[in-house]
Amino acid sequence: MKKSLRSFSTGQKNQFEVILSLCQGADYILMDEPFAGNDVFNREDFYKVLLGILEPTETVVLATHLLEEVEHFISRAVLLRQGKIVGDTSALTLSENGRSLMDYVKETYHYRPDRVIRALDDLTEGEEEL
């Protein structure tokens, strides 16, 4: 209680910001990577608490790269590219089709699993001749 906010770790500061945002009673709560600096246990606890305290009229818009972690806590996924919606699906639709969120993201963004190998090959092309 007597600790200065400046002395908080990055994870503690992020937790504090999340708590403040949830205390506002807004219909829409926007969070951009709210878990930076938190370990996996703190993040999982946060998801559980969040689901337990949200009112039916409240919506959390969460931007994150931690897809595997949030997959079981979300009801909808909206994917953006350069400010435009390029994908929009529900967790129920993914489940009914036997697909994971990561599969959906990879398909939507046209992920190529060989992209790193191809880039390395392009970079090293011609070096063998030296």
Image: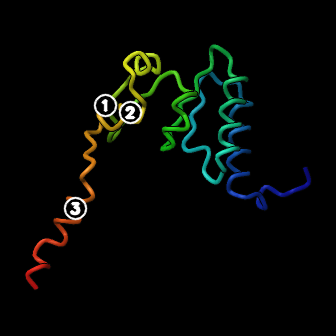
Q: Residue furthest bottom?
A: 130
Q: Is residue 60 left or right of residue 125?
A: right
**Mark 2 and mark 1 residues within 8 Å of each other at the beta carbon:** yes
Q: Name the residue under label 3.
A: 119
User: Is the residue 96 above or below the residue 112 in the image?
Assistant: above
Residue found 22% across the figure and 61% down from its top: 119
Q: In which quarter of the image is residue 121?
A: bottom left
What SS does tag 3 mark?
helix
Q: In this view, does 130 lie to the left or right of 108?
A: left
Residue 65 on image: x %, y %: 48, 44
* Three-letter amino acid code at the position of disc 1: Val
Q: Mark 2 points at which residue?
A: 79
Point out the image quarter for the C terminus: bottom left
Residue found 79% across the figure and 61% down from its top: 7
What whole-number distance in Å separates the C-alpha atoms at marks 2 and 1?
A: 6 Å
What SS does tag 2 mark?
strand
Foreground: disc 3 or disc 1: 3
* Three-letter amino acid code at the position of disc 3: Ala
User: Is the residue 96 above or below the residue 127 in the image?
Assistant: above
Query: Front-most of 8 and 39?
Result: 39
